[in-house]
Amino acid sequence: MNDVFQPIEPAAVVRDGTALYAPRFDDHYYANSPASADGVAETDYVFIDGNALTERFCQLPEQSVFVIGETGFGSGLNFFRAATRFLEQAPASCRLFYYSSEKHPLPLPEFAAIQRQRPWIPAELLHDFVANPAPAAPGFHKRVLAGGRIHLCLLYGDSGALWPLARLRCDAWFLDGFAPRKNPDMWRDELFQALARRSSAGATLATFTAAGFVRRGLQQARFLVERRKGFGGKREMLVARFPGEWRPARIRPRQVAVIGAGLAGSTTARALAELDCRVTVYDGRGVAQGASGNPAGVLYCSATPHFSDRNRFYQSSYFHALAWLRRLGFPADPAQGRLNGVWHLPTDAGRLERMRKAQEAGYWPPEELQFGTHAGRAGACFVHAGYLSPPLWCQRLLTHAGVRLLQQRVRSLQAAPGGWRIESEAGTEEFDAVVLCAGHETQRLLDTGPARLRTLRGQITLVKATAASQRWRQAVCHSGSVIPAVGGLHVVGATFNRGNDSLAPDPADDAANIVALRAALPMYWQELGGVALTLAGRRVGLRCYSADSLPLAGPAADAAGQAIPGLWISAGHGSRGLTSTPLCADLIAAQLLALPLPCDGRLQEALVPARFYRQP
């Protein structure tokens, strides 16, 4: 189903003095008059004051969460004004979640140029936004800014289609599409109904327009609407309130145990710790000693013209993983890896054609996926992908003051009053919640029933670098992959052996990896020394995957398919753990703490472990 998620066409804009003009809608992004001061005064009057945000931010209790929803991100003016006011007025322990839909996002160069004309934006906030841009791809794009105080999620696509899929409750709304008569799709009754379903009790709303059908539509959606004097030369505007008494939500820090210190466990621990949870990570073997322990791995995606929920997840998680890496400054040096592009060279013409159709379908922006030739073969380059050291990435993730690492094996897991009891080699501790991130060992601690995880044995081959191969800078994927030298060794592989759980290295797998490399990239094989290349080692790991090839990310389920309170799973990431684990970590953290979700509801349902209990 890709009816909701359509290709994104960036905005075409024209400079009109100091303002921006949108020819598509014959309208300006913000008021272009001396009284407006490039739109700032109108934004403050209509949206900041119309929702009484200054007073509400000042009165927030410690560790509160304030959620703003917006229709029409545009030039980002409303966001930057609200975020700036929040940083100035709200207690430092509070967080702002800002969700904004946009069908035609501004190209990044144009967007960055506009912000440079707004000297009032805090430097850290602007830097974080520009340094970690959202790609022009359909769906939800979450970014964490200003040291974690601002959580921005851009919903790229049609507002009426995407807001029903959002999973949050908004405390305030900004209705700021282009004028209703020029952009009627933004002002439909269906959208007003969706906003009502996503409103907290007592939520407020403000918009620059006073059009009668907008007022009536909001009233039909149960908003209590009133007219107010408009800004400047506009006679009237609308403000509204949703029934009920508004009470700000709060983050209640939890004591959480994470079982497993690989990619799934490390990302989950980091996501929870950044939201003030106190996290204990258990792993008897230490950090990244299981399937996440390869010295290097590739972070990339597959491109397909079929934008199913499964394929959407892998694209969304790919972009989400890149956002995490940029924010945390990883990789910082070649020993940690490089995000300098990954070449995917399909093994047959049919697969190459499917990749071309994926780009033609418009789901991949041209600045993210580019076609060309590499090593004499046609293929595609994922421009911002790369290769990383999973162990070093896991170590970086776990260096947070809120994370405690115990190199202890968990012996048993039992429900306790108000939480869970863990018995390990170090003794017994109780926690509010537990997240199972133990890969194929998850089954030892919990019977996942119909969601039973499978294992897939993989062996990588380590090849000694040569003077010629030391010049390689980008990872290349074919039927396997080859990674530039890290510590003087190249990672080649890996094999995919179903039904084999042996951790013993197999020389036949080394031979298979080298044969695949020679067939796909004969020039690479030759530069490694050809028949005289030097094998320097190997490593075996047991990947964990599910029946539908999507991870399990969400509440664990009992024998009846019902969620088990306080018990969560992040597992089944297969060979894509570098790509898939950050989004799953944020999804679990948001659900565990009752915060707005970082993805749409369809992806949440596609990942929930209980999906395997449902009747077809």
Image (spheres, helix red, strand yellow):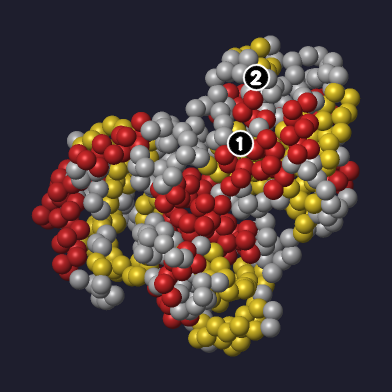
Tell me if residue 428 can be seen: yes
Q: Which residue is rendered at x = 32% and y = 47% of the image? A: 475
- Which residue matches tag 1? 159
Left or right relative to 394: residue 169 = right
| Residue 315, percent from left and from top | 44, 46
Determine whether 44 is above or below 345 in the image: above
Label disc, if present, on residue 585 of the rendered structure: none
Q: Is residue 332 visible?
A: no
Disc 2 crowd, CA 10 A, few/some/many (<14, 14-19, 20+): few
Residue at the top extreme, as displayed: 17
Residue at point 41%, 32% (across, down): 362
Residues at discs 2 and 1 in contact (Cβ within 8 Å): no
Residue occupying image coordinates x 81% and y 14%: 34
Q: Position of residue 36 (x, y in %)?
A: 80, 19
What residue would you read off at disc 2? 182
Relative to 483, say whether 446 is above or below.
Answer: below
Residue 395 position in % (x across, y down): 51, 63
Residue 235 lies, in percent from the top left, at 86, 19
Extreme residue in the left direction: 531
Q: Earlier in the sequence, mark 2 or mark 1?
A: 1
- Kind of residue indicated by mark 2: Lys
Nearer to us in this view, 190 or 378: 190
Q: Amino acid at mark 1?
A: Ser
- Please tell me which residue lies in front, 68 or 440: 68
